[in-house]
Image: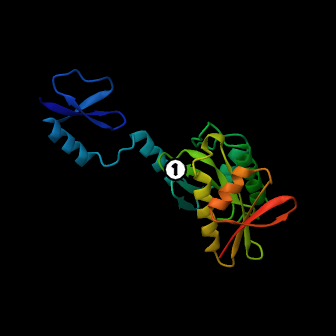
Amino acid sequence: MSHLVILNTEQQYAVWPQSAALPAGWQPTGWTGDEKSCLDRIGQEWTDLRPASVRAAVAEDRARPAVLLIPAGTVQLREVLPEEAAQLKAGSTAGLDWLGGEPGEGTRAAAGMLVGAAAAGLHQPGWGMYLLTRAEDAVVVGGMGFHGGPQDGQAEIGFDLVEPARGHGYATQALGALARWALTQPGVDRVIATTDPDNLPSQRVMERAGFTRMPDADGLFVYQLAN
């Protein structure tokens, strides 16, 4: 049986019997032959299996004027600019796709802190807020960042994931990557993160990221990762 290679609007390929009517939304490419030769042609041409819309979203996110991008496994940390933080603080999505539709309260609060620091002239590039975006589709799953620049060799990190993103390892990967980045910066020899005693999920994230429990402070559990 003769087949043809067809293509849809998402630039995805398929093999289709030449005698059958084309399915809705698909167009012929002009490549025909037996099934094996059609599959071989697809294998040569279709090297990126992501839909075109996903590829475009990822490319758009990477093209944004972010100051710093830090890879972290299945997610990446993208630094937030003060003008983006102002949009998040005001209740918008800053033009980004968020898992669950919108940022969490912790992320909006962190955005407000970044806006305040920038207004006071205290914002230090690299030591502010980051968004966690999935590497596969550029969807934002939460926020993470520093509580200001390092002091006395120590930097502190906080994080917040939207509810649907929890339990997938995103925070663990991102926390480990951001802490390791901090420890490569001049004068930084330890990174800490704190949590309420009853916040077991956050405690597990810190432990899985390699942090060690330290003495409590102000009623909070303190975890540390050091050189």
Q: How is the image coloured?
A: rainbow
Q: Tell me: 157 left or right of 4.
A: right
Q: Is residue 106 above or below residue 213?
A: above
Percent position of residue 173, x then y: 58, 58
Q: Position of residue 185 (x, y in %)?
A: 63, 74
Q: Is residue 86 visible?
A: yes
Residue 121 appears in the figure? no
**Exactly how many numbered labels are in the figure?**
1
Crowdedness near tag 1: few (<14), some (14–19) or many (≥20) residues, C-alpha within 10 Å: some
Percent coordinates x, y for residue 123 in the rendering: 73, 63
Q: Would you name the residue on which mark 1 appears?
A: 61
Disc 1 is placed on an element classified as helix
Residue 188 is drawn in which quadrant? bottom right
Q: Amino acid at mark 1?
A: Asp
Which one is nearer the viewer's eye here, 190 or 143?
A: 190
In the picture, which quadrant includes the C terminus?
bottom right
Snapshot quadrant of residue 117: bottom right
Residue 178: quarter of image: bottom right
Q: Is residue 106 left or right of residue 177?
A: right
How far across and how far down the image is residue 89, in percent?
73, 45
Q: Residue at x 25, y 24 (%)?
A: 22
